[in-house]
Amino acid sequence: MPDITSLILDDHDWFRRQFAALDDLDDPARLAEVWQPLADLLDVHAAAEEEIFYPELIPRGDNAEDETLDAVGDHNDIRDGVRDAGLHPVGSAPWLAAVRRAREANSEHMAEEEDDALADFRRNAGPALRDELGRRFLEFKKNHEGARDLDTSDVDPESYVAEIEDRTKPDTSLGIGSLKDKR
């Protein structure tokens, strides 16, 4: 079964290997061959986590709001680096600097997510939910391969968390308000 936490970790491992592969290259054509799929998956991965993982962590996690605020902020930093790299010729000094910013933001994000959000979710979500979310995560990635149809603009972390909390807040009304219309 495709546990979402394992799938996220698999992507993290792939990100680390691809960034390391860039270290061995200097030819712009080869850099582009490695960078473009990496840049695309960085964007798709962030969007998939924001669509599927974090909305389920927030109502279940022990420190989920703070973890999510931090993660979405990290996603923004990663997206900014990817976006900035796209503005410069592959292999140029500004491109290398943008890729470096994306790499550093991603490394920080992965470490925090692995130590905090993923561990928190494994403690508080059962295997059936993790598998269902894993199926949805894989489907999202398949449907958005190449990231061309994704909105990769930054997401306001506070608004994102507030929206998820509003959406997942249990209805505590007693339904009494509906009685006044039945007189």
Image (cartoon, grey):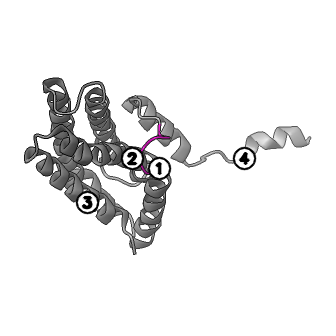
Pick whichever of labels 1 and 3 is earlier in the sequence. Answer: 3
Q: Examine the rendered structure and indicate whether residue 2 appears above or below residue 118.
A: below
Q: CA distance from mark 2 to mark 4?
A: 41 Å
Q: Nearer the viewer, mark 2 or mark 3?
A: 2
Depth order, front residue of 140/87? 87
Secondary structure beneath dot 2 equals: helix
The amino acid at mark 2 is Val
User: At which x and y percent is residue 17?
Assistant: 16, 55
Q: Nearer the viewer, mark 4 or mark 1?
A: 1
Pick whichever of labels 1 and 2 is earlier in the sequence. Answer: 2
Question: Residue at the spot x=43%, y=61% of the render?
Answer: 138
Q: CA distance from mark 4 to mark 1?
A: 41 Å
Secondary structure beneath dot 3 equals: helix
Name the residue beneath numbered marker 2: 44
The amino acid at mark 4 is Gly
| Left/right of residue 23 with respect to residue 183 in the rendered view | left
Name the residue beneath numbered marker 4: 175
Look at the image and say whether residue 146 sits in the magenta stretch: yes
Q: Which residue is outermost to the left?
A: 24
Name the residue beneath numbered marker 3: 9
The amino acid at mark 3 is Leu
Q: CA distance from mark 2 to mark 3?
A: 15 Å
Q: Residues within 10 Å of mark 2 (few under 14, many from 20)?
A: many
The amino acid at mark 1 is His
Pick whichever of labels 3 and 4 is earlier in the sequence. Answer: 3
| Left/right of residue 126 with respect to residue 94 in the rendered view | right
Query: Which image quadrant: the C terminus?
Result: top right
Name the residue beneath numbered marker 1: 144
Does the residue at mark 3 contact the one at mark 4 (Cβ under 8 Å)?
no
Question: Residue at the spot x=31%, y=58% of the render?
Answer: 8
